[in-house]
Amino acid sequence: MRSRRVGRHALLVMVDDPAAALSARALVLELAAPTSDDPLPAPLDVVPAARTLLVDGLPDPAAVERWRSRLDGMTLPAASLPESGSSDEVVVVDVVYDGADLDVVADVWACSPQAVAARHEETPYVVAFCGFAPGFAYCTPVAPLPQIPRRTSPRERVPAGSVALAGEYCGIYPNPMPGGWQLIGATDAQVFDPDRADPALLTPGDRVRFRAVR
């Protein structure tokens, strides 16, 4: 891991991939836990991205330096996305596989559109990080799939609930908005609701299963 200061109260940790970012997040939470042998100052938030981890809201620059001295050069365990567990540990998202870009994905995966739906449903995913829009979770397959190119021309409006693929990720559009991902289906799940106690349905580290429905 490599890190750099971000202002007076944050530290940006750089890693190699989303799996490593999740592993680094777990490590940071462990090091800040009161039960740790030598707990470090607790951050207000720990935010993973594709290849970085922001340790934010530290009390002062001295706390930032304590974190830097502990993390810099530390080797993470072999990073891997967690395997799917029992059904009560997994967020299940019901999907109608009728997306406008099923044929595009089928060409990349060298299969039929029906097989795209089956393969997507059978693949366990993990939320690597959130971004782009409130509630938009970048879900990564536990077993790598062929990457899907973005559309050459983004749509001006993608309906809320659209399930889409781009690169190595699967995402659900929380609201109507522009977007360039390939649409494979739609869900009624409300992935972001500011009136809920937990507004985002999916958060980093969550395990996700997509389930086909009619």
Image (cartoon, grey):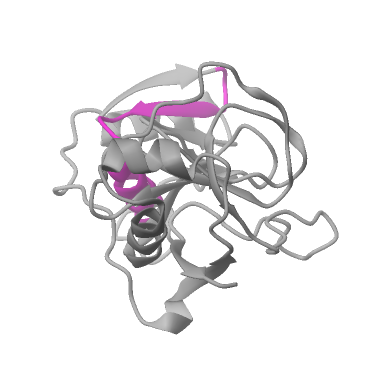
Q: Residue furthest right?
A: 195
Q: Is residue 167 magenta?
A: no
Residue 28 position (above or below residue 10) = below
19 is higher (above) or lower (below) than 126: above
For residue 20: magenta? yes
Q: Residue at x 43, y 82 (%)?
A: 87
Q: Quadrant where the N terminus lies?
A: top left
- The answer to whether residue 43 is seen in the rendering is no
Classify residue 6 as left or right of residue 105. Answer: right
Instruction: Determine whether, in the image, residue 110 is placed left or right of residue 54.
Output: left
Q: Pick the residue in front: 48 or 57.
A: 48
Q: Is residue 47 left or right of residue 132?
A: left
Residue 96 x %, y %: 58, 63
Q: Quadrant of residue 159?
A: top right
Identify the residue at horizontal 65%, vertical 44% (top origin).
Answer: 173
Q: Residue at x 72, y 60 (%)?
A: 190
Determine the residue positioned at 40% across, 27% down: 149
Q: Give the image location of residue 78, x and y in percent.
A: 14, 48
In the rendering, at what x and y percent does residue 166 appear? 44, 34
Q: Splitting the image into 4 quarters, where does residue 51 fall?
A: top left
In the figure, residue 196 lies in which quadrant? bottom right
For residue 50, say whether it is visible: yes
Q: Nearer the viewer, residue 5 or 69?
A: 5
Task: Say which quadrant the C terminus sits in.
Answer: bottom right
Label total for image: 0
Q: Compare residues 152 and 39 and report the one nearer the observer.
A: 152
Relative image position of residue 183 (x, y in whole percent):
55, 42
Q: Nearer the viewer, residue 141 or 106?
A: 106
Q: Which residues, given as a range, are shown in magenta?
A: 7-30
